Amino acid sequence: MTQNTIIVIEDDQATQQAIRTTLGRDFQLDFVKANDLEIRLAQNAYVLAIIDQQQEGGMLLKRIRLKEPTLKILVLSAEQNLAEVILAIKMGGTYFLSKPLKAERLKETVQQILEGMTFELLEVSGDYPWFFTASSKVEELLKMAKNAALHPMDIILCGETGTGK
């Protein structure tokens, strides 16, 4: 396989065709059934995995992470809710796209992932949940909040309603 090979685990024919049409000129695409995942990962080097989150109840992410901890993973899902996105990122996904795929968005996302843009998980001390962000400004705020938590002081968070303060 070439250095620009993407492994694709997707059982929907329409989505496979969209991926083939959009990315086939720039990348070698290796469409794999979920059963053959570990064998292919052992045999070949990939720059990216594109997977369907609904296959195997999300276990594909765990299986990939066990074999290839640093492989970037684009998670596809017909579900379009925040809980699905958060779950995909927490389980090791690099990025998330909703189906049906839009060609320009898919191509742009793959380029961004391969150029190094990822959601970075930052663990905040204590019993706080994980946060994910692709924004350096939000990352900076999270680091400031983590530092502030180390000191006994009151903090007031201001902002518009619904912004997630």
Image (spheres, rainbow, N blue to C red):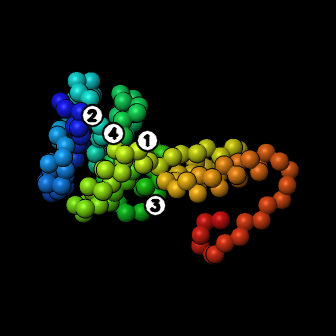
Q: Nearer the viewer, residue 50 or 21?
A: 21
Residue at 29% across / 41% down in the picture?
Answer: 49
On the rendered structure, is 52 left or right of 158?
Answer: left
Point out residue 69 in the picture as x, y percentages from the top left corner: 41, 31
Q: Mark 1 to mark 3: distance in Å?
A: 16 Å
Q: Quick check: 162 above or below 14?
A: below
N-terminal-most mark, 4 or 1: 4
Q: Mark 4 to mark 2: distance in Å?
A: 16 Å
N-terminal-most mark, 4 or 2: 2
Q: Nearer the viewer, residue 77 or 143?
A: 143
Q: Mark 3 to mark 2: distance in Å?
A: 28 Å
Residue at 85% across / 55% down in the picture?
Answer: 153
Specify the amino acid type for callout 3: Leu
Quarter residue 56 falls in: top left
- Could you tell me which secondary element the residue under label 1 belongs to? loop
**Disc sitting over residue 92 in the figure:** 1
On the rendered structure, is 61 left or right of 164?
Answer: left
Crowding at dot 2, Cα within 10 Å, few <14 / some 14-19 / many 20+, comes out as: many
- Could you tell me which secondary element the residue under label 2 belongs to? loop
N-terminal-most mark, 4 or 3: 4
Q: Mark 2 to mark 1: distance in Å?
A: 16 Å
Residue at 22% across / 24% down in the picture?
Answer: 43
| Labels 2 & 1 near each other (Cβ < 8 A) | no
Residue at which label 2 appears = 46
- Could you tell me which secondary element the residue under label 4 belongs to? helix
Residue at 37% across / 46% down in the picture?
Answer: 115
Residue at which label 3 appears = 82
